Amino acid sequence: MMATGRKFLQVKAAATAAPGHQLKVVTYNILANKYAVGGYHNYCEDRHLKWPYRREAIKLELEGYDPDLLCLQEVEDRVFRDELQPWMKQLGLQGLYQPRQFGEVSGPPEGVALFWRSDMFRLIESRVVQFAEHAEGRPASPRSTGSIRSGRAEFWDVFCRREEGAVLALLEHTPSGCPLLAVSTHLFWNPAYPDVKSMQAAVLCKQISALLHSRFSTLDVPVIIGGDFNSLWRKYKADNFDRYIPPGGQGLLSGVYSLMSGGQLPPQHPDHPAGRQRAREQQQQQLVAGALPVGSSSSSAELEGLLLDNGGLSLVTMHMSAHGCEPPLTTKTASFAGTLDYVWLSKEHFKVLQTLSLPYTPPPSWTDPMTDVDFPPIPNEHY
């Protein structure tokens, strides 16, 4: 039982799973201190937001999870170097870290960390990836193609200024001698730019594929990706960011989720850079008659040539594999509720045996997690 009262629950379908090696994977955005005290969470008491208080609660929770692979996001540089890394070493884990300096909030760098159990894994090779450095089709100078108001220029300017990335570790699972690629990542937060997030996901997958191709003649290697993808599984209600939701009750599958689970993201999808720009152009034309004169080329047409795919990986989330759906929410604040955090697995290599219990009872069906999920009041003794 964890400090929060949560526990790992057996997956019914796992009862017939053949015996094999087991490992426990956890992903956790621990909320950088500069964001915790920056005014975004003023519905909580100040004493619960200060790092010394949260640090002890986080350590107690992580120790209770007892992970073999641990993916962390929003880890401040000093916290990793002076606190987490020494403490994790005492627990038998070693790790890597990729910081980012750029952000809307001033303060120390924060980034992603990846830890693995030393007596279970041996590091073969590691890479750190900054998404903006690896995008195919990226112009040499994003702003040189037009003003920041130009859709194509705006997409590339936002994408290239971001410092999100990932830590990749190719490991040897010492009990079996088999390789395993573990990844920790964090995508752009802003819901106004799902096209940027989709491109980041495509870069992530292609960098994973490139590392595997550099070592092996096949992609038939176990892959685990844990992170905060800042992308919903499905959206059922239109809002300011997605004004149209397809009819039929299936909702809108986000671009990031579509790409990673389905293999590619077509230009027609509203979260593809071309699709997102097409929606912006249509909105502009409604506001300003004749915004695009006859014979002119639109920014969306220029972006349609961008190929967004997952590098040939075959992926499924841990929760989808175990339960056939995603949970209504993994993140809850006073103004937002939704699923943003996932553990992705290569389909053919893993059988999910247990998943961590949710701190709420999922309703049989839901449209808006903010109103449809009976979540305990925040803050409470655990949150």
Image (spheres, rainbow, N blue to C red):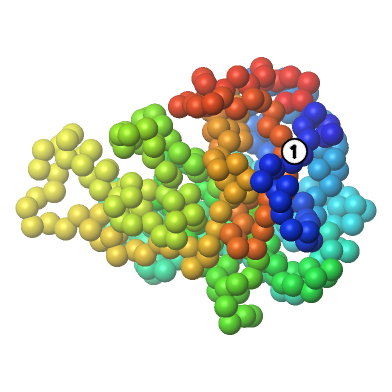
- Which residue lies at the image location 78% right of the left edge and 61% below the top edge? 20
Q: Residues within 10 Å of mark 1 (few under 14, many from 20)?
A: few
**The furthest residue to the top:** 377
- Which residue lies at the image location 86% right of the left edge and 43% below the top edge? 63
Q: To which residue does mark 1 refer?
A: 9
- Which residue lies at the image location 78% right of the left edge and 47% below the top edge? 79
Figure check: 133 above or below 59? below
Figure check: 236 above or below 309? above
- Which residue lies at the image location 39% right of the left edge and 36% below the top edge? 251
Left or right position of 355 against 106? right
Left or right position of 128 against 291? right
Q: Point out residue 312 in the picture as x, y percentages from the top left corner.
A: 49, 68
Figure check: 111 above or below 179? above
In depth, the one of 219 and 244 nearer the eye is: 219
Number of numbered discs visible in the structure rendering: 1
Q: Point out residue 164 in the picture as x, y percentages from the top left corner.
A: 56, 54
Location of the C terminus (image quadrant): top right
